[in-house]
Amino acid sequence: MKVLLVGSGGREDALAWALSNSAKLTTLRCAPGNGGTARHAENLAIGAEDVDALVRHAVEERYDLVVVGPEAPLVAGLADRLADEGIAVFGPAADAAQLEGSKIFSKLFMQRHSIPTADFQVFSDPGEARAYLESPDTRYPLVVKADGLAAGKGVILADDRETAVTAAEGMLSGRDFGDAGRKILIEEMLRGREASFFVLSDGRRFVELATCQDYKRAHDGDTGLNTGGMGTYSPSAWLDDATRQTLLEKVVRPTIDGMAAEGMPYRGVLYTGVMLTAEGPKVLEFNARFGDPETQVLMPRLDGDWLDLLDRAARGELGDVEPAWKNEAAVCVVMAAGGYPGSYGKGFKIEGLERAEASGAVVFHAGTRRENDDYVTSGGRVLGVTALGVDLDSARRNAYAAVGEIRWDDEHHRNDIALDAVQRRDR
Ligand code: AMP
Ligand code: GLY
């Protein structure tokens, strides 16, 4: 099969690695890819959000399948445009991608289908939002969210009135997130542990993927700023069988059925972020894509062919496939630029990649570029170092042993990825 992969992050390098392991693959190209994807694919100079150029290229080259990594081109209608041209695409159509692209769409959908989520109100008028936030009946803390895509920055946890009013006004005036903030949600603050849950759907049927857990804060002990994700492990220590069953019955089944019933069948990966509350799991958000760096632990754990699985989902033909997972656990440690998620330097030479991979780990590239015979840093999250092991403890040791082989000036990583899970099992 001839496949085009869209995106440029660590997620896409993990997808490129997985697709290149398939016996069905003949050609893999990546638009635009990164230093790492060039090992498995031919990188193209087409940006992941340049929908017109992607469609033109895909039509000229008649790909058998286009796999879309990030959400923005999906929300912009890339899957619809490719489908119109008769090209199979892994990733939902624009109407279905609204589950991620519009937080208000997603909340109203959950309300229609009785899917458990935080209580909420919708506002577009600054005066009404202010009146609500200043009402003596409104309880704090609460959460203020921009409706549209805001590069992961459109959610403000507000402990007090002043923070909430400032956030709401910044959003509704268009100042903070442009049009993405002209409508907002004000939500009840949920308490508990966060978890992510992934299924693959062909529009009607779905299959559960392996569970995994990510670490969003920049520093050890869940301190520091929120990032895109500093590490992951799989399987999750917190999503037990009962919780998984609840999620399948109360969240995933009604979502896939509801989207189909409303004429927006959901094809692709549905990534549900949940809060495990005392009242059971409640949905924080839906994403229309694989997680990053969740993909870096999911890909190596499949005991099977990812290309076959993604292709079946894309064609609406999952049939009765049941993905099998290796018994081994996986841990991914993200190595980032010092300063990330704030400002950071680029262009540092990376050393020790070969030694790290010789240890059996897989080093996925997120922000690297090739310069002569070297790889140099070119982004905030630079590498995702993934290792398998007979259990989480051993996967963790293997991953950190490989991390220890790699260095560049100003490198930063967390030392406690999967540590809470290992300690929990020990107790
Ligand atoms: P979202 O993009 O909606 O998932 O929000 C980003 C992050 O904000 C989540 O991963 C949570 O950590 C936090 N968050 C969002 N909504 C809530 C909520 N209702 N209660 C508590 N935390 C929340
Ligand atoms: N790791 C979080 C995300 O991909 O959104």
Image: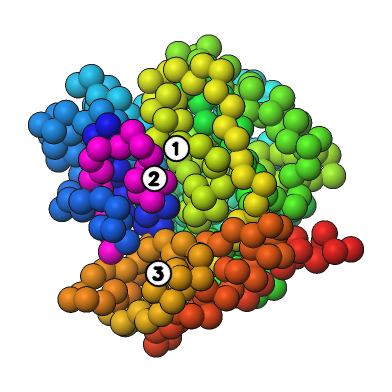
In this image, 276 relative to 45: left or right? right
Q: CB atoms at circles 2 and 1 under 8 Å apart? A: yes
Magenta region, residue range? 16-35
Residue at image mark 2: 21
Label 3 CA crowd tier, 10 Å (few <14, some 14–19, many 20+)? many
Q: Position of residue 176 (x, y in %)?
A: 41, 57
Q: Position of residue 75 (x, y in %)?
A: 36, 36
In the picture, the quarter occupied by the C terminus is: bottom right
Q: Tell me, yes or no, whether the highlighted magenta stretch contains residue 29.
A: yes
Q: Is residue 165 visible?
A: no
Residue at image mark 1: 306
Q: Tell me, yes or no, whether the highlighted magenta stretch contains residue 26.
A: yes
Please identify the quarter of the rendering in which residue 56 is found: top left
Residue at image mark 3: 382
Measure how far apart labels 1 and 3 are at the Cα level: 24 Å
- Dot 3 amino acid type: Val
Q: Residue at x 26, y 77 (%)?
A: 374
- Mark 3 lies on a secondary structure that is strand
Q: Position of residue 327 (x, y in %)?
A: 67, 47
- Dot 1 amino acid type: Trp
Q: Nearer the viewer, residue 398 or 251?
A: 398
- Dot 2 amino acid type: Asn
